[in-house]
Image (tube, rainbow, N blue to C red):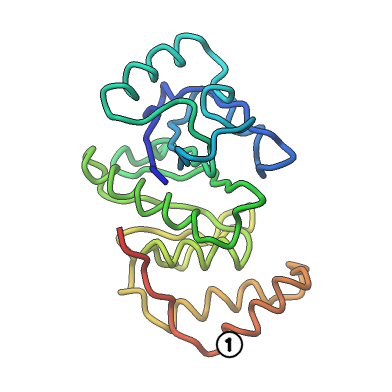
Amino acid sequence: MRPVVLGWPPDGPRLRLDHRRFAYAGKFVMSATGKAVLLDPDGADADSLADALLDEADRERLARTAGEAGWSLDAAVLGAVAFSEDRTDPATLRVRYVTVRADRQGERLGPKLLVFLRDRATERGYDRVRIGVNNAFSYEAAYRAGFGWTGEETGLAELVCEWPAPAGRSAERYRAGLDRFRQPDREPSEAERSFLATREGTDPPAVIPR
């Protein structure tokens, strides 16, 4: 597998992902956000990057980039992330959407994409990366990528996680975030309730390696 930045905001390429296999697929057709993808060079199929790119100009530009870097547009897209600069703080990159192909979920591909993006964002000069998560699974994925809950929540009932992690990724802060997802008004699914039960009283998960 290979993670690749396809473009930075505000000029990210537009991607047409299969809505039957990718959550938030419709959010990736926007051109105002940067995009990064996780590619499988051995799994070319209907989910290839070449098929997903909507604009011919992007396809030609990325074909040149791929040839120089040694990867192919024929590789299958396993996951994607969209991101943009924070509207009030240009030193902060905000992750807008993360999606992983349905048949590859559970392989920690989301955290791998986030680790890749946060490192590329640092190289590009951003001081921090933020993501809003609205369920326990996304919260755990963010922690596996080295993020930590800031203590903030958005009006969309999302917990705001940040890298580098605030409060040293303390166990207390991590557990407090999990408790937010246990609230009855959030109506967690049965799968989410089962997952939360396994995380009762635990420490933050280990950060996956780069």
- Locate the C terminus and report the quarter of the image it occupies: bottom left
Report x, y in % for residue 142: 46, 61
How crowded pointer 1 is (Cα within 10 Å; few <14, some 14-19, many 20+) is rated as few
Specify the quadrant of the image occupied by residue 92: top left
Report x, y in % for residue 103: 66, 52
Residue sitting farthest toward the bottom: 201
User: Residue shown at 50%/9% (left/top)?
Assistant: 56
Q: Is residue 130 above or below residue 2?
A: below
Specify the quadrant of the image occupied by residue 5: top left
Report x, y in % for residue 118: 33, 49
Identify which residue, 18 or 46, lies in the foreground. 46
Q: On the rendered structure, is 156 left or right of 49?
A: right
User: Residue shown at 69%/42% (left/top)?
Assistant: 21
Q: Is residue 149 above or below residue 98?
A: below
SS under mark 1: loop
Q: Is residue 21 above or below residue 162?
A: above
Q: Is residue 72 above or below residue 77?
A: above
Q: On the rendered structure, is 164 left or right of 134?
A: left
Specify the quadrant of the image occupied by residue 199: bottom right
User: Residue shown at 61%/84% (left/top)?
Assistant: 198
To which residue does mark 1 refer?
200
User: Residue shown at 53%/37% (left/top)?
Assistant: 77
Q: Amino acid at mark 1?
A: Glu
Count of marks overlaid on the render: 1
Identify which residue, 99 or 101, lies in the foreground. 101
Identify which residue, 183 or 109, lies in the foreground. 109
Residue sitting farthest toward the front: 42
